Image (spheres, rainbow, N blue to C red):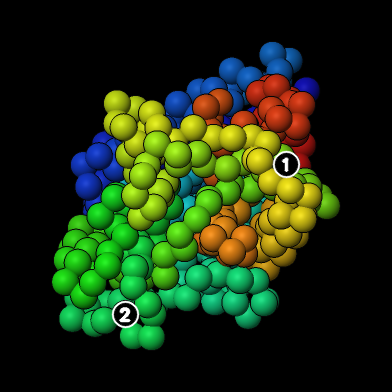
Amino acid sequence: MTNVVIIYNESLLLVKGEPQDMLAERGVISCAQAIAAALPRADTIRTVPIHSDVELALTPYPPAEWVVFNLGEGLEGRLFEEARIAWALEAMGYRFTGSKGDAVARSIHKARAKEHLAQAGIPTPPWRVIRDPKEGVGELSFPVIVKPVAEDASLGIGLDAVVHDSTALRSRVDHILKCYRQAALAEEFIVGREFNVSVWGDPPEVLPLAEIDFSSFSDPFERIVSFAAKWQTESFEYNHTPVLCPAPLNSRQSHRISELALAAWETIGCRGYARVDMRMDEQGTPFVIEVNCNPDLSPEAGFFRAAQAAGYDYAAMVRKIVHLS
C-alpha cells in the first residue's frame, strides 16, 4: 500500500495574463481529480490544493510516509513557482513525481532552455529575447512567432503570435510586456509539421510519436498549437487540431525525432516523464521548440494518448509515474 498526496494549484485570480488563462488553471484541478480516481483503491490518496505555500499544504503529510504526485504549477500564475515547488519538495525530503527544480527552471525559461539545447548541438530555431517594443528582430528573419519567455500551456499564444513585419512585432511584444509582465521570445517560425514526443522512465523511453493534424488550416502561418487549440473547447482551433498517434513518419524520420527527444531530455535534466515539442520544416529537418518537464496528464491530453498507443490504460500510466518518483 502507498500513501499518495496529489498537490495542485487552486487560484481564485491571476496576477498577470489574460482572463481566459484561468481555463488552464482549472485544467490542473480536473487532472488531479482524474489521477486520484485512477490510483489503486488499496492506496491512501489525498488531493491537496495549494492556496499559499506548498510547505503549509503538506504539513499533515510527513515525507517519510507520503509520496507526492506533483501537479503544482504555482499560485495565481506567478513566475517560476513551478520550479520553487519542486525545489521545496526536494528540500523537505519527499519522493515526488516529475522533474526536479533545476530542470523545471531550465525548461520554463524558454530562452535559457534554447541556450542549453544549442550548446548541446540540438537544433532549435534561431531566437531573440525582446525587452522593449522598440527593439527589432536583429539577425532573425520574418516571420517569427512571439511568445512570453517564461510561460507554458500555450499562454499568450494566439493566431496573431506569428508576425511578418516590425509593426506587428512591436504590437505583440507590447502586449506580452504589459499583460504577462515579462520579456518576449521571438523565434523564427518553422513552416511545416508539429510533433509532440512523450518520454518517460529510467532509462528514458520514447512513447509513440504524435503529430498535430493542421489539415483544416490552409494558411501555413496559422498551423500552431494556440491557447484556443489547447483550452477553448468551443473554438475552431480546438475542434480542428486532432492528433495522429502514432504519427505518419518513415523509420528515418521517427529515429531522428526520437534521438533528438532523448538528447533534449538529457540536456534539460528531465526525470520521470516529460514532453518534447518539435517542428519539422519542409525539407524534413526537425527542430526542438520546447521541453515541458511536467506536461498535462489529463485523460484527454497528449501524454496519455501516447501512453495509450504504447498499450497503457490511464490507471497503468498513473501507477507507472508514481513508481518512477
The residue located at (58%, 23%) in the rendering is 36
Q: Label 1, on which residue?
A: 207
> Where does the image place residue 32, in percent across and percent down from the top left?
51, 29
Residue type beneath disc 2: Val
Can residue 222 be seen from the camera position used here? no
In the depicted structure, whether residue 27 falls above or below residue 86: above
Q: Is residue 193 left or right of residue 318?
A: left
Q: Residues within 10 Å of mark 1 (few under 14, many from 20)?
A: many
Can residue 302 be seen from the camera position used here? yes
Quarter of the picture holding the N terminus: top right
> Where does the image place residue 204, in percent across and percent down from the top left?
78, 51
Q: Is residue 303 left or right of residue 23?
A: right
Q: Residue furthest top?
A: 41
Pick whichever, 26 or 282, lies toward us: 282
Does the CB distance between marks 1 and 2 fall below 8 Å? no
The alpha-carbon separation of the residues under discs 1 and 2 comes to 36 Å
Within the image, what quadrant is residue 261 found in?
Answer: bottom right
> Where does the image place residue 71, in percent across and percent down from the top left?
52, 40
